[in-house]
Amino acid sequence: MYQYHCLNQISDVGIQEFSEEYVPVSRVEDADAVLVRSASMHEMEFGGRLKAIARAGAGVNNIPLERCAEEGIVVFNTPGANANGVKELVIAGMLLASRDIIGGINWVQENEEDGNIAKDTEKAKKAFAGCELDGKKLGVIGLGAIGVLVANAAVSLGMDVYGYDPYVSVDSAWNLNRSIRHAKTVDEIYKECDYITIHVPATESTKGMIDGNAIGLMKKGVVLLNFARDVLVVEEAVIDALVAGKIKHYVTDFPTPVITGVKGAIVIPHLGASTEESEDNCARMAAKEIRSYLEHGNIRHS
Ligand code: MLT
């Protein structure tokens, strides 16, 4: 009999991966395995029984990896399981930065009471005119599961896509559209692209990578998208660049107190993976990893 604890509500479809040999317990200290989405485990006591933690998501910043290694607790994540959900929100983010959809919707709500909207749409057309993605250059930094999906989707929107990843060459990356250009350095992305989207994990070497120097290399009016982790970006530098008009929009899935409310920032409350499908996929993969480890000692290498 295995005991597991869910730290966040994990999709029922995922939990159904467990057989009747698995029982939920209410305390982390009593569990053989923990499933977690976003709750931080850094300050948590584990108890002697814990053997595995599965994060229903890609990033593992909420898990104390060093302590787990010392205590022999295996940590799994679910790479790729929510990639499609994130990809779709990144594309939506590019569209929100290019067409003032929110301004237009608000305008309709504000004006609907006078019944003259049809006549006034001429004014709205001028006030909310945008630009198209077709023909614009997109730089994708990081060609893991999400970066590859974003790059391929952007090609089908007519964008001229540049890919950069220090560990994966675009030529050898699987499933990449042949028309995606291989940027040899990240600076090439900064200098060339109209839209830049970051899809790298938060590590010691990537934290703060979008700083004043990186922004200095970018084109005036660039749109920067961050659906990876807030710490990749030096927010004060982004704010200065928004105020100066160097960055036109910063689209972020991380509503930090610093960025929220800044003009030109489009801030989303970490919804990238919040789709029914992504939540089910992550929970299913997390539960399978736990079973495979507890029952057979398998550890996936990805
Ligand atoms: C991830 O790391 O994949 C996301 O943070 C998942 C989530 O939204 O929970």
Image (cartoon, helix red, strand yellow):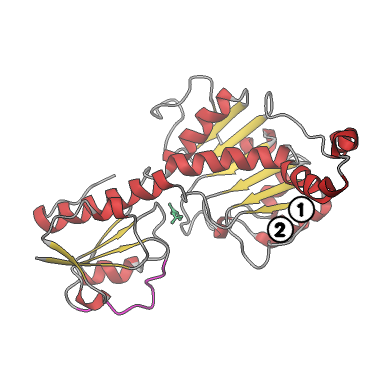
Where residue 33 sits in the image (x, y, percent)?
22, 65
Q: Quarter for ligand 1?
A: bottom left
Determine whether 74 is above or below 281 in the image. Answer: below
Which region of the structure is painted magenta? 39-47
For badge 1, the amino acid type reads: Ala
Q: Distance between the residues labelled 2 and 1?
A: 6 Å
Query: At 10% across and 60% down in the image, what residue appears?
Result: 21
Q: How crowded is mark 1: few (under 14 residues within 10 Å), some or many (20 or more)?
A: many
Q: Name the residue under label 2.
A: 237
For badge 2, the amino acid type reads: Ala
Determine whether 201 is above or below 33 in the image. Answer: above
- Nearer to us in this view, 275 or 228: 275
Determine whether 144 is above or below 69 in the image. Answer: above
Where residue 293 sits in the image (x, y, percent)?
16, 55
Residue 165 in view, yes or no: no
Examine the image and state in which quarter residue 189 appears. top right
Furthest residue in direction top, as rendered: 178
